[in-house]
Amino acid sequence: MSNISKITKFTDLNAWQEAHKLVVAIYKITKGFPKEELFGLVSQMRRSAVSITSNLAEGFGRQGQADKKQFYIVARGSVTELQNQMLICHDVGIISAKSFSGLSDQSVIVHKLIVGLIKSMERGK
């Protein structure tokens, strides 16, 4: 009997699980942002983070390989967008170097997992 469990739902994807951790972290850290950023960086960062998990979920639910891959590519783009926003927050002093480092590390994990998903689809052709 194999120890490898079958992926039957989007929440089984390692990429989604790690991205979900990132979403939760973004929501927690943005709670402490200045009020003037509520409709700026807070809103934008939360949308970017949610977009990652949403596109992974939607891609998982698609039938065609090309369709799946496109959603995973969009998720990868959302990670990169979020990384830019985190860098801005760090550079303008909204988040500490320690907070930035933790978020950055998690975003790199998510990016690598999504790239792996995309590459596995390309190999599967």
Image (cartoon, rainbow, N blue to C red):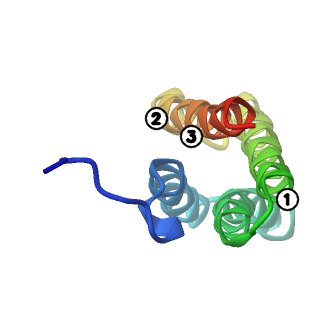
Tell us which disc is closer to us: 1 or 3.
1
What residue appears at the point 86 percent right and 61 percent down from the top-left corner? 40
**For the residue marked with disc 2, what is the amino acid?**
Gly
- Locate residue 98, reporting x and y percent: 45, 30
Q: CA distance from mark 3 to mark 2?
A: 13 Å
What residue appears at the point 65 percent right and 64 percent down from the top-left corner? 60
Q: Residues within 10 Å of mark 2 (few under 14, many from 20)?
A: few
Q: Residues within 10 Å of mark 1 (few under 14, many from 20)?
A: some
Q: Which residue is mark 1?
A: 67
Tag count in the figure?
Answer: 3
Q: Which mark is residue 102?
A: 2
What residue appears at the point 65 percent right and 59 percent down from the top-left corner? 33
N-term-proximal mark, 1 vs 3? 1
N-term-proximal mark, 3 vs 2? 2
- Describe residue 118's horizontal placement relative to residue 13 as left or right: right
**For the residue marked with disc 1, what is the amino acid?**
Asp
Q: CA distance from mark 2 to mark 1?
A: 32 Å
**11 and 25: which is toward the camera:** 11
N-term-proximal mark, 2 vs 1? 1
- Residue 27 picture quarter: bottom right
- Describe residue 51's horizontal placement relative to residue 111 as left or right: right
Tell us which disc is closer to us: 3 or 2.
3
Q: Which residue is mark 3?
A: 110
* Local SS, label 2: helix
